[in-house]
């Protein structure tokens, strides 16, 4: 069990997109592993959101660009004697593997899933306020009466086109999150501010606070600096207030 909660703040649009996709992939994986009627519905909605995301933008191209960028940056480290060459070589091979998998996908990711009639019908009804009821989509009601194993196989097949994308996004974020060490910091009267080094492209901020803390961080970042306000909100019905005491936390400024 973790002893810290981690709050993340992306500092560019590409990482922001990857974090959104990661959240959808995690949501899908959790509900697919359980497999009840309700879990199936949430897993299907997660697939539809991933599909909508990949349809609006060329996610495959963005992921490939980032994998290639990370490969290039990490390859330069191989010339440094203090680097663990065995571990670095393993990471580089893993990146190459994921690049090859994505490049082997022809056309737009998820086109097969986009043509599934049941998912298309759900997507159309999702725009209507309120939950989809049995009278809205009898075909969905019928599908939910199928054996659990059959439903699971259907959903896994619909998600399959996104498998390599899922793995690649996770690899990118894992490398990024492990690219820096934690530093111990203190927010005086609940406020912390730090300048960003323009010579180092920080892509992600990670703020860790101990489990049980009564405050949480609100992060605001620009090109030259970022600030953190630690807020307290014991009653969700009321507006949060900035903590008045000093807050100790760990900060990780991730760049690769």
Image (tube, rainbow, N blue to C red):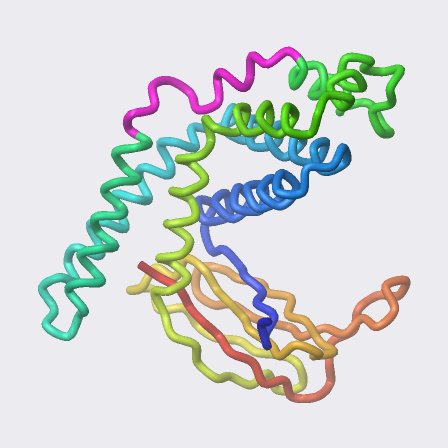
Q: Place residue 137 in its image quadrant.
A: top right
Q: Position of residue 85 (x, y in %)?
A: 15, 64
Residue displayed at 47% across by 31% down:
162
Q: In the image, is 190 to the left or to the right of 157?
A: right
Q: Place residue 180 in its image quadrant.
A: bottom left
Q: Is residue 113 above or below residue 171?
A: above
Q: Position of residue 97 (x, y in %)?
A: 26, 40
* In the image, residue 111 lies in the stretch drawn in magenta: yes
Magenta stretch prevailing secondary structure: loop
Q: Position of residue 144 (x, y in %)?
A: 76, 23
Q: Place residue 174 in its image quadrant.
A: bottom left
Q: Looking at this view, is 1 or 190 the one in front?
A: 1
Residue displayed at 56% across by 12% down:
115
Q: Position of residue 190 (x, y in %)?
A: 66, 81
Q: Quadrant of the C terminus?
A: bottom left
Q: Which residues are magenta?
A: 103-117
* In the image, residue 119 lies in the stretch drawn in magenta: no
Residue displayed at 45% across by 60% down:
204
Q: In the image, is 78 to the left or to the right of 31?
A: left
Q: Looking at this view, is 254 or 144 the one in front?
A: 144
Q: Looking at this view, is 196 or 37 the one in front?
A: 37
Q: In the image, is 230 to the left or to the right of 172?
A: right
Q: Is residue 164 above or below residue 77?
A: above
Q: Is residue 239 above or below residue 97?
A: below
């Amino acid at each position: 069990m973790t002893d810290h909660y981690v709050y993340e703040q992306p500092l560019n649009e590409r990482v922001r997109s990857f974090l959104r996709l990661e959240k959808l992939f995690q949501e899908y994986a959790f509900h697919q592993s359980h497999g009840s009627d309700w879990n199936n519905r949430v897993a299907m909605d997660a697939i539809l959101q991933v599909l909508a995301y990949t349809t609006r933008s060329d996610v495959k191209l963005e992921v490939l660009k980032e994998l290639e960028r990370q490969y290039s940056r990490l390859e330069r480290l191989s010339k440094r004697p203090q680097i663990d060459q065995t571990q670095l070589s393993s990471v580089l091979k893993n990146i190459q593997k994921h690049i090859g998998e994505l490049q082997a996908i022809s056309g737009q990711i998820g086109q097969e899933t986009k043509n599934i009639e049941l998912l298309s019908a759900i997507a159309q009804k999702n725009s209507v306020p309120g939950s989809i009821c049995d009278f809205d989509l009898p075909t969905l009601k019928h599908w939910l009466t199928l054996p659990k194993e059959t439903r699971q196989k259907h959903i896994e097949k619909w998600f399959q086109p996104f498998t390599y994308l899922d793995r690649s996004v996770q690899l990118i974020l894992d490398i990024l999150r492990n690219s820096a060490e934690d530093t111990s910091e203190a927010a005086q009267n609940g406020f912390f501010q730090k300048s960003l080094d323009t010579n180092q492209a920080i892509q992600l901020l990670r703020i860790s606070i101990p489990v049980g803390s009564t405050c949480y961080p609100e992060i605001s970042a620009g090109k030259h600096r970022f600030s953190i306000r630690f807020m307290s909100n014991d009653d969700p019905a009321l507006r949060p207030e900035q903590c008045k005491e000093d807050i100790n936390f760990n900060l990780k400024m991730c760049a690769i």
